[in-house]
Every structure is written in structure tokens, then in C-alpha cells.
Amino acid sequence: MVKGSISKIAGPVITADGMKGSQMYEVVRVGDERLIGEIIELEENRAVIQVYEETVGMKPGGVVEGSGAALSVELGPGLLRMIYDGIQRPLEKIKEQTGDFIERGVDVPSLSRTEKWSFTPVVKKGDKVESGDILGEVPETEVIRHKVMVPPGVSGEVLSVAKSGDYTIEEMIVTLKTESGKTEISMLQKWPVRIGRPYKEKLDPTVPLLSGQRIFDTFFPLAKGGTAAIPGPFGAGKTVSQHQLAKWADADVIVYVGCGERGNEMTEVLEEFPNLEDPKTGKPLMERTVLIANTSNMPVAARDASIYTGATIAEYYRDMGYNVALMADSTSRWAEAMREISGRLEEMPGEEGYPAYLASRLAEFYERAGRVTALGSDGREGSLTMIGAVSPPGGDFSEPVTQNTLRITKVFWALDASLADRRHFPSINWLRSYSLYMDAVEPWWSDEISSMWRELRDKSMALLQKESELKEIVQLVGEDALPDRERLVLEAARMIREDFLQQNAFHEIDTYCSPKKQFEMLNLMIEFYNRADDAVSRNIPAKDITDLATIGEIARLKFVPEDEFEAKIVEIKKALNEEIRSLVDKYVER
Amino acid sequence: MALQLKEYTSVTEVAGPLMIVEGVEGAGYGELVDIRLSSDEKRRGQVLEIDGPRAVIQVFEGTKGIDTARTRVRFTGDPIKLPVAREMLGRIFDGTGQPIDKRPEILPDAFRDIHGAPMNPTAREFPREFIQTGISTIDGMNTLVRGQKLPIFSGSGLTHNELAAQIARQAKVLGEGEEFSVVFAAMGITFEEASFFMKDFERTGALEKVTAFLNLANDPAIERIITPRLALTTAEYFAFELGMHVLVILTDMTNYCEALREIAAARSEVPGRRGYPGYMYTDLSTLYERAGRMKDKPGTITQMPILSMPDDDITHPIPDLTGYITEGQFVLSRDLHRRGIYPPVDVLPSLSRLMKGGIGGERTRDDHANVSDQLYSAYAEGRDLRNLVAIVGEEALTDRDKRFLEFSDRFEKEFVTQDRDEDRSIERTLEIGWRLLSILPERDLKRIGADYIKKYHPAYKEGAKEASDKE
């Protein structure tokens, strides 16, 4: 291995001499405490290294030792339910070693070497297997069966398989006869984080990633394997939105990367998730979750690593044939980490001091999302959906990170501080947001829920658009000056905004809304509008209609439990009929 | 120290707050440096960068008087450590931790690295204990909890100091009598401001519970980099070793950030927005993230940084980056202040992210969350209507709109406004809230559950008869 010595220290970046023979992105150990670092620049004998831990106390002359390998993560059973730091060290284990505060130089394996997992083989001696083929299964948690796969680049004939039983991740479970001889396979794999894991073929997304959040699912849907950006100023609800997605998205596995954010937010997830039930499986949400936490006060270089660590773990579960969703909160902190390191390297800055490669790094990251046919002869499909929060300075969407992200992601959920100020949550601006997956997911809605879905959604959007135009007029002349039919548009749009788009993340029932309920709620609102519009055209005053008691009933629909709402809707429709009929009697028949 | 340390006289360059020493051997990044001037004055510095034999040092007390010929420099081999002890309670220190209250040096119980270490998220406990500050806009609508970091975003000339002092004076956790203290760090504020706080602490007899670190406007700017770290190191010792509940007031964070920018500029670093260094977010987080509470420890650190927004601009990098790290913010409004409203808290942009965990039946009252939501949305609507009235006149409003207008006016006069010594209980705050909400038509109280309306709405409380009349 290459051994050099420290010559320069500037914050998280150090320079070492005598490093000839090292590779770009090779992991090195720095100084007496053997801190972990990664080579990010090479020039003859010199290597520039970003160090993933605090560098205070480092001295010139200290030893730098190469490892010969790129920064990698450990993959195998035991990832789920864990909380890792940016370079995949389990935080629980760090706490056992250094107490309540994270000291540096802690060396702990990512996955337990002693824990035993119950392995059941699905291949037998003599089977021919290729890369990605499933060798056996392990019940990793109550909801996820971990598939032990042939590592990429390996294929051959099974010479021996371990019997069903309990094994550690390092014990060999399968021996293959390969072209070059024999290969032994254990449940533990390693993969370099900066390289995407291979798959057979990328496919177009077709199925929505349902989150039970009305504005996401119905108005700006995300597809499984798609990408979404959620930019917004502080206090607009980025983190609550990301948490809601992590809680209720109908993915099989969730990887949540807390990148440069608050420590208490990670603690909240840790306290909350084990006690929340997945609506699909009825099991605690933690059973399907991996957390990566690089809080804002942890070393900045590890923030860069945390994003890649998360993506690689997510891809690994995708390869097993699962639908995986990755939330990164916030990608702006990652970009700032790049900027800080770039500044220390004295690179020529691009826009706002960010490095010129900001756009390509963001694009590479989001491109790791997708619905794929995984390696392996069974042609199984898996997907990786990515949702990145962006924290634009001052809430200004024209800044480089937001702009470069929007060029790649297909869904834009625009958070709006003025909505948050009036406690309209989720404070997603319905006029600025968009989804390019509308056409892709329409067949699903049409088959599973109703063929009316797209029409209903478009009609609602049209009402909201119309409302914003009318509001400009109201600002000038007052609402009383509007004709009745237009006042009705305002009422219907208000209903959609307040009673449909607003959703209380902290309300027991409202926190999750099934697609069926979403559709029926919106359907009822549009039906109300149609009936009311019809009534107004028969000279019934809009004022009488906006006073109808049914409106209050519709508003409370979001708090009606999933198993009761259908009956409730029938009831409301009946009441609406009667109320309108009595108005007709009052005004028209006379 | 028994060990003889090598002394260097090889200062080659002095620029702004920085000093460069050549020919250095064995100095570590970030370590403390003792500097002795030709006048025999002692100063301290910290290693910012080492490039082979060349060390870049930031000098805390400023570089005035340093020469390149006779200045002697010693590398101590240690990061900057603060001696800490229980007896620091009731004491006043300067911005570098030297006592300035004419009392003896403290006898340290321990020495702590002033940079601290990140709290392990698995060791943290999510803050949920309600702190009653006696201020309606805070308790009722932006509840503070123990272990939270909640800054005051203010502007020059606003009453942020009065508000912070009132919070420090009145803050209590209901039904508990645990040990409580205040750590106060002043960065670049004027003598008068500092003296306002000290007098207020004295007047209320809180002084013996206060530890103050004062870096005033005429003290060296670079000192401001370590002042908040000394305060937080002390707070960590009080909270996590001695089990106290500590409130840390940091004022004014804007001066701290200016000092950061000064160093970055002296080092010719690539600037980020408005000349502030690109790592300002990370740097601020190493201060703010030191608030919190832990599973196995009784004490807590609650932080209340104060910053003045340049030109009242909330998108300025200092409030902006702060808001991204802290768990909410109280925003003071010049408009309210001009109208003579104290405290001039503008509730709309204000926020407490940890409120939801700190309120409710067991902690405050079951209707709290609903009432707060309703006050928010009603006040927001009332404020919109004010703009409308400015154009179309009040006559054009519907009866419903007029009620919202009345609501928002009275909200500012009765709910927001209170005396500087007025300590409102949470019940009182909610009662005022209900009184104001009763101005609005009941069907517009959409954010409040029907059962709470029955239970708390004045129309129902004042007697069953009235209630039945209403129906």
C-alpha cells in the first residue's frame, strides 16, 4: 500500500506527499488516529484528501496510508432499521464506544459480524447462475425478505450450497465454479459508493408512488422510479413533507438521508418510526427504513459521502426487486459541502461560488433513480425513486442548486412561504408546481380507481387557475362586484384549496388519505360545483348556495376514517340534492 | 506546564486578523497559540492552516501592535480549552473567558475543548417540555420547549433586548422547580445594551444564576469567533455534567457573522453570497446544534440567539442560514413596533418547529393546537383584508369580512400587546384567544374541532341558555 505524509492541513482538506501510486477516490487513513479520508485530487506525488472527520490536531509529517480501495459500503442483511453516519458507521455503535458525543477515530463495522441470519437457499448443486441471480433468502425484518444475490460480474455453476440455517454475514454460503476457478460467496457484499450498481435495462415509470398526500398523489403525481425536487425556504415544510413521504409512500424500502440537517429531526424519526404502522403491512415503519444521518455539525466531507452511501444502499434493495424510495434532505447542504471542499482546493468557482461540476454531479445522482430490470435470469423488476429537498437561500428559486435540480427532476413541488405563513399545509404552490408523470400514471388511475381521474384533476386545476385570475379583479373591485357564476368559482376553488389540498400531517386520520378517498373527495367537490353552477344559471343567488350546510360537511370529509367515508359521501350527496331542491323550490318554482 | 515549548520569532506576515509564522515544526491544525508581543503583552490565537513549515494563525485579540521582528509565538499543542466550574455561575467574563468582575480567577473543575463535539442523534431525546414564557405570541402560537434553539430575528431599533430579557426572567416549566441558569454571550453589542441585560438580571435577583461572556463593540472583532463557543461550552458543562436547565442567549449573531467574513476575506477565500464564506452554514450549525437534551442526562440547553437583520431583510444570508438550522424563529416587525405594540412579534413569519410536541392535553391544554391554527389563519385573512380595504374602502366589504378585520385589529391590541412585566399563564393566553375568536362567525372556525368549540367557546361557556338560543 502507498504510504505518504501530511504536508498541509486546511480544515477538512489535507495534502499529502509521497502518494504516487494512489488512485482517485481511494480511501486513505490519515494520522495517528487513522481518520478516514478520500483522495479527491492527484498531482505527481501529491494527493489532496478530504477527511471525513474533524482534523483538529493533525500535524505535518503525519502518516497517510492508502487502502487500495474506493470508498465502499457494506451490503447485506442488517441494513434495515439502522441509523448510519455519512460513511456508514452505525451511530448506535459509535455511542457505545464514545458516549453521547461523537468523538473521532471510531472504527466500527457497518454490519454486525456476529449476528446470525436465517438463510434459506433457493439454488442447488449443479445450477447455473449468473450475476444478480438469487441464491437464497433471509427474513431481514418482519416485512422485507432479503435476497442474497450473485455479485455483479460473477457467474458459474453452483458447487455447494449451505443448508438452511443460521449464518453470519461473513460465512460462505455458496461456492461457484467460475471460468477462473472457484468463487465463494457470503451474504456480505461491498460496492463503491460513487459507482451506480449495474442493472439489465432501464424502463419507463408507469406506476404512481402513492404517498397518501392529496396534493402529491392527485395533483402532481410521482411515479415509482421517478425523480422529484421539493425546494422551499425555511419554515415552509420541506422536512415535514419529506417525513410524510418517508412514512406513507407505498415503497417497499425507504432510505432517508438527513444531509446537513438538524440533529433533532433525525431523533424525531428514530423515536417516531418504530411506533408508526405501515398502512400496507401493519408493521412498524422502521422495519423497512434505513437512516443516514450527517447532521449539520458533523464533518462536512462526510456530507458528500452520505448522499452516495444512501443511493448505493437504495440500489442494492432495488436489485432485489423491491420498490425503493430515497429521500435526501437537503441536497443544498450537499452542494454546499461540494462548494466548501472546492473552495479549499482553490478551484475556479462557477455561479455563486459553487464548483463548475455542480450540475453534472446533481445529474449523475438523480440519474441513479429509475425503474429497472435487475440483473439475474428471472427478469425481476425493481425501482428507485428519488426525492430531493432543496433549500434555496432566501427562498429564491433562481439560485444554482434549485435550477440545476429542476433541469433533471421530473416533478417539481414548489413550497411557498406565504402559504406556510397562513398555516396552509402542505404549503405547496399549486400554480407553480408540475409533474411530468401525468401521462405515465394516468392508465394506473384509470384502471385502479376511475377513468374520470384525469378529467377531474384537470378541471380542478382549471378552477384554481381561474381563481387566481379572479382574485386579481377582486383586489381591485371587491368580491361583491363579481357576477354570481364567478363567485361560485371562488367558492369551489376555496373548497379545493382548504378542504382538499390542505392536509394535516399531525391529524390521526388526515395524515394519510387513500387514492380512492382522494378521488371520491374531489369528485364530490366537482359535483358540488357543477350542481351549484347549474343552480346559479337558473337564477338562484350564489349567496344562498355558499350558505348551504353541506359545504361544512364536505370540509369535514378529510377527517372521516377510511372505512366510513364512502357511506358519508352518499349521505352528503343526498343532503346536497335536498338542499338544492329546496332552493329551486324557493326561487324557481315561485 | 512543565514541558518547555519551543518559541518562534519567525513571524513573516501580518494581515488583518491573521499572522503567518514560518519554519514551524510539529504544530497541529486548530491548536491554541500563545503570542507575546514586544511590549510583553500576551495574546492568544489559533492555527487556521498549516502548509509544511508555514502556519496561518488567527489572533483573537487583534493584530494591532504585532511586529515581525520581536513577536514570540508558542504552539501549545492543545486545542483551545476552557476551564469550567460550578462557581462560574454569577460571574462575568470577557469575550475570551477572563474574569472581568474584579473577583478571583475560578478554580477549574475540568477543562473542555471549546469546539465541543457533535451530539450523537441516537443519544438525543426529542424536546417536548413546554416552557411558559408568559408571552402570548410565544406560548400560544410559537411555543418554546426545553432543548430547542429558537432565535429572535430583529432589526436595529426594535425591542429584541427587552423581549429576550423578559423571556429570561419569566421562563419556567410548569410544576417543576429544577435548577435553572442563564448563560449570556454578548458579541459586539454596545456597553449600554450589555448593561441593560446585566441590570435586568440584577433587578430580578437572577444575577447569581447568570454566567456572562461579554465581547463589546470596542473589543476585538476576532474574539467574537470564540465568545459563543465559550458560552456553549460552559452551558454544556452546566447542563450535561451538573444537570441544570440552561438558557443560552447569544447576541448579536450578526456581529459574529461579520467577524467570520472578516477572517475569510483576510484569507482571500472564494466568497459565497454577499461576501460571507461558503462554510458559514456549517460554522453556524456548530453553534446552534449544541442545543438539545439527552436521553440519560437530566439537564437541557435551550438556545435563544438574537440577530439583527440588515435592512430588516429576512432573506439576508445571516437570518436565512440561521433559519435553516434553528427550530423556528420569532420575527419582530417594524410595522408593529411603530404602532407602539410590544412585543412586536409578527406571528405570521414566526414559527416554532417543536411546538406540536410541547403542547396538548398533558402539557398545556387539549384545544391549544386548534386555537393556534385558527388564530393564524384568521389573522392572515384579516391582514389580507386590510390591503383590500386600502384599495376599495371598508364599505365594499361583506359582513363576514368586517368581522375578520375587527378580529385582526383586536388580535394585535389584546393578544400580541402586553406589558413588559406581564406574565400571562397559558390558560390566560388561550382565554384571550377564544375571546377574540368569538368575534368570528362560528362556521368559520374550521380549524377547531366541534367538541372544543362546545367546551371552550365563550358563547357556550357563558351559560347553557345562550347556547341553546344560538341553535
Image (tube, grey):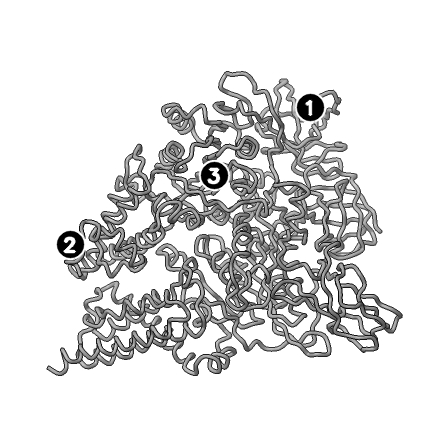
Q: Which residue position holds label 1?
A: B72
Query: Which element type, helix, strand or loop, lies under badge 1?
Result: strand
The residue located at (26%, 45%) in the rendering is: B432
Q: What residue type is labelled 3?
A: Gln
Q: Where is residue A401 in the image (x, y as percent from the top left)?
A: 54, 59
Q: Nearer the viewer, mark 2 or mark 3?
A: 2
Q: Which residue position holds label 2?
A: B465
Q: Nearer the viewer, mark 3 or mark 1?
A: 3
Label number found at residue B303: 3
Mark 1 belongs to which subunit?
A: B
Query: Which element type, helix, strand or loop, lies under badge 2?
Result: helix
Residues tagged by mark 1 and mark 2 found on one chain of the structure: yes
Quadrant for residue A103, please give it: top right
Q: Where is residue A134 in the image (x, y as percent from the top left)?
A: 73, 72
Query: Which element type, helix, strand or loop, lies under badge 3?
Result: strand
Q: Quick one: label 1 or label 2, which is nearer the N terminus?
A: 1
- Measured in 3D between alpha carbons, the distance from the residue under mark 2 to the one under mark 3, in whole angstroms, is 49 Å
Q: Quick one: label 2 or label 3, which is nearer the N terminus?
A: 3
Number of residues whose C-alpha sits closer than 10 Å to that of mark 3, classed few (under 14), some (14–19) or many (20 or more): many
Up-down: is A590 above or below B149?
below
